[in-house]
Image (spheres, rainbow, N blue to C red):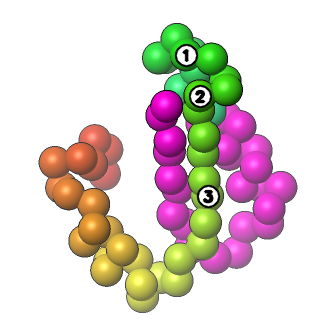
Amino acid sequence: MPHIAVMMYPGRDEETKKRLAEKIRQAVIDELKVPASVVSVSAFDIEKDAFPKAMENIPESNIILK
């Protein structure tokens, strides 16, 4: 059960978010060799000024790429 959450600044339409989620999902399937049925992806908007606070909830040790 991998779940990937993508936070982004507002401005992208739902179709763009869906395409991004599909590409991320496929990358996870390919890399982890898991079925699509166990992979979920969320993509949601977060205002620029709220982003730093939201990032505080993610431990630095869990952030692989910056």
Residue 7: percent from left, percent from top? 51, 63
User: Residue at horizontal 72%, vertical 55%?
Assistant: 17
The residue type indicated by label 1 comes to Val
Q: Is residue 7 above or below residue 61?
A: below
Q: On the picture, is 42 further left or further right than 47?
A: right
Residue 20: percent from left, percent from top? 68, 45
Earlier residue among tags 3 and 1: 1
The residue type indicated by label 3 comes to Ala
User: Residue at horizontal 58%, vertical 20%?
Assistant: 29
Mark 1 residue element? loop
The 10 Å Cα crowd at callout 1, few under 14, some 14 to 19, many 20 or more, is some
In this figure, which residue is indicated by the disc labeled 2? Answer: 38
Residue 19: percent from left, percent from top? 76, 44
Of 3 and 46, nearer the camera is 3
Displayed quadrant of residue 39? top right
In this figure, which residue is indicated by the disc labeled 1? Answer: 34
User: Residue at horizontal 53%, vertical 77%?
Assistant: 46
Q: Which segment did they paint magenta?
A: 1-24
Separation of residues labelled 3 and 1 (CA atoms): 21 Å
Separation of residues labelled 1 and 2 (CA atoms): 7 Å
Q: On the picture, is 16 further left or further right than 45?
A: right
Separation of residues labelled 2 and 3 (CA atoms): 17 Å
The 10 Å Cα crowd at callout 3, few under 14, some 14 to 19, many 20 or more, is some
Mark 2 residue element? helix
Residue 27 appears in the rendering: no
Earlier residue among tags 2 and 3: 2
